[in-house]
Amino acid sequence: MLLPARTAVLNYLYGVKNANVTQIMEALKPIYGGELQFTKARYLDHVMTLEANGLVSLCGYDLDEDGDLRMCYEINEDGKNSVEKYVDKKYRSQ
């Protein structure tokens, strides 16, 4: 079973301390990299939607080597509870 991409982003953040969009995409590339919607803009949208819904929090930001804004996110308790409720244990990031 393939998780919806936004759920996969939340699931990935469940298993790490924090990550930026580039790190999330690198981790999910083996599974989702072949999809046409596998773009930085789409994955930034996923993370920002998760933030707007109160499932992840912005935990830091800086500029990358190209001078572009890089935002780092972490899952919060509501996000963890959602993963535990809706993502089967065999698919959950540890």
Image (spheres, rainbow, N blue to C red):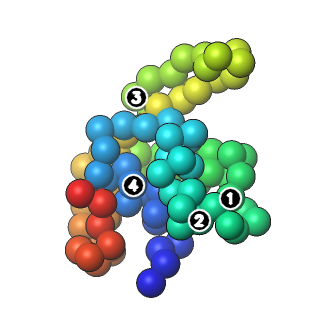
Tag 1 or tag 3, which sits nearer the N-term? 1
Q: Looking at the picture, tell me which residue is in the foreground, 66 or 85.
A: 66
Q: Residue at x 39, y 54 (%)?
A: 12
The mark closer to the camera, 4 or 2, is 2
The mark closer to the camera, 3 or 1, is 1
| Spot occupied by residue 88 in the image (x, y as percentages of width and height) | 28, 78
The amino acid type, in three-letter code, at marker 1 is Phe
Q: Residues under labels 4 and 2: Cα distance? A: 13 Å
Q: Residues under labels 4 and 3: Cα distance? A: 16 Å
Q: Residues under labels 3 and 1: Cα distance? A: 24 Å
- Circle 2 packing at 10 Å, graded few (<14), some (14-19), many (20+), is some
Is residue 36 shown left or right of residue 63? right
The amino acid type, in three-letter code, at marker 2 is Tyr
The amino acid type, in three-letter code, at marker 4 is Tyr
Secondary structure at badge 4 equals helix
Secondary structure at badge 3 equals strand
Q: Residue at x 62, y 45 (%)?
A: 44
Q: Is residue 45 above or below residue 33?
A: above
Q: Is residue 61 above or below residue 33?
A: above
Secondary structure at badge 1 equals loop
Query: Which part of the image, by quadrant, shows the N terminus?
Result: bottom left
Secondary structure at badge 2 equals helix
| Residue 26 appears anywhere in the view | yes
Please name the residue that numbered disc 2 is placed on: 32
Q: Which mark is residue 12?
A: 4
| Spot occupied by residue 94 in the image (x, y as percentages of width and height) | 23, 57
Q: Residues under labels 3 and 2: Cα distance? A: 25 Å
- Circle 4 packing at 10 Å, graded few (<14), some (14-19), many (20+), is many
| Spot occupied by residue 21 in the image (x, y as percentages of width and height) | 56, 41
Asked if the residue under mark 1 is in contact with the one under mark 2, i.e. CB atoms within 8 Å, the reply is yes
Tag 2 or tag 4, which sits nearer the N-term? 4
